[in-house]
Amino acid sequence: MSNITQLIHSIPVDELTGAIAVPIYQTSTFVQEAPGVNKGYDYARSNNPTRGTLEQIVAQLEGGAEAAAFSSGLAAIDAVLKLLKSGDEIVAVDDIYGGAFRLFNKVYEKFGIKVHYVDTSDVQAVFNAITPATRLIWLETPTNPTLKISDIAAIASIAKAADCLLCVDNTFASPVLQQPLLLGADIVVHSATKYLGGHSDLIAGLVITRTKELGAEIKFYQNACGAILSPFDSFLLIRGIETVHLRVKQHCINAQAVAEYLQQHPAVDKVYYPGLSSHPGHEIAKRQAKGFGGIVSFTLKDDSEQAALAFVTGTRYFKLAESLGGIKSLLCHPATMTHKSIPDEIRRAAGVADSLIRLSVGLEEVDDLLGDLEQTLQQRVVRKVIDEQPVLVV
Ligand SMILES: *Cc1c(COP(=O)(O)O)cnc(C)c1O
């Protein structure tokens, strides 16, 4: 059976009624025959049939033993950090998602957890950062927004030798392209808000574990702390997952075309996309993933913030918004949006230039997307390069 057939048939038919779609069990509690004698459910924070079905589907999708669904990606990350205790240390990717950085540094540091940020695309740097107190290695691959690639299998063996956990935030790749648990990671987290949901209509998070034991610990924190995904959002997420294979495949095709187009454009300086052979992580990405994803970043030859702002407000189909992974193309300017809270020098040192633009390439006809980029570069950027005229400033 192919993976896709397996995915589609992992979504069960409702045993009670035969409903082919997963029912939304919109209930807070479940009637018991006697105290503790029930049909497997007692209170909907602890377990809900709609959420439980989602969790089974997702565990299978990532090749894990257990999954737990949370009310946001950050709530999922938070649940993983609760496996640690005061005095423990984390080695994390330096190009980390801003919200994770805030959670690590502004919340968990207060409780005595220390984080070392390193360039995890350099395996030796990860090895060197490990101390006897390291309990967790935290990866994102590809990263946001410079799409750096880290070698999951190599870092998994370092984690194993050092007796610490490896967690991979797999949001950018999605399980369609990359299954970190099968490469030796212990935990995978997702902002399911992005590709898994896929329609920009919900906020959700997932934790998937390789072992049942670790899964039980995560479920303990899910219930004890309470940031669960609602039955309706669980239903929406199942609906998104039903087409994730098709969507991600097309996101990859469109993104590759966009990256190749930008690479040859005279007004564009650098293009960041792991699907380009010029990308430093290209070979590792090819080995550990089935595709290169839907996110493309680039800088303009005109490296001013104004040029980038003129570009991001000049497109027609690429809508200016934070977030990614939906059917509609989005773009953002990390320096003034997602990475605004990071001091300028640190942001620039991490490769996020003032003129860097991040595209979440959607599912529109690719020629329309290329046309949109072309007209924007012509009107807003090339004109300046050619005529030395000031760009339109917003
Ligand atoms: C969006 C995102 C998150 C946070 O997820 P929310 O659902 O917004 O809480 C975490 N990691 C990555 C890589 C993301 O892109």
Image (cartoon, rainbow, N blue to C red):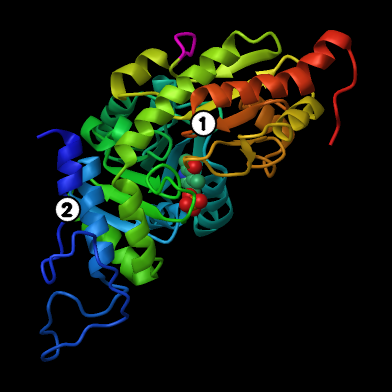
Look at mark 1 in the image and give the residue it sits on. Answer: 361
Farthest residue to the right: give it.
Answer: 389
Q: Is mark 1 within 8 Å of ligand 1?
A: no
Q: Which residues are magenta?
A: 276-280
**Nearest to viewer (mark 2 / mark 1):** 1
- Residue 181 lies left or right of residue 352; in this view the side is left
Amino acid marked by disc 1? Val
Q: How far across and how far down the image is residue 13, in percent? A: 14, 59
Q: Secondary structure at mark 1?
A: loop
Q: How far across and how far down the image is residue 86, in percent? A: 43, 56
Distance Cα–Cα, label 2 vs label 1? 36 Å
In which quadrant will I find the C terminus? top right
In front: 29, or 217? Answer: 29
Residue depicted at 48% across the width and 31% down the height: 143
Look at mark 2 in the image and give the residue it sits on. Answer: 212
Amino acid marked by disc 2? Lys
Q: Confirm whether residue 355 shows in the render.
A: yes
In front: 110, or 346? Answer: 346
Q: How far across and how far down the image is residue 55, in percent? A: 25, 56
Q: Residues within 10 Å of mark 1 (few under 14, many from 20)?
A: many
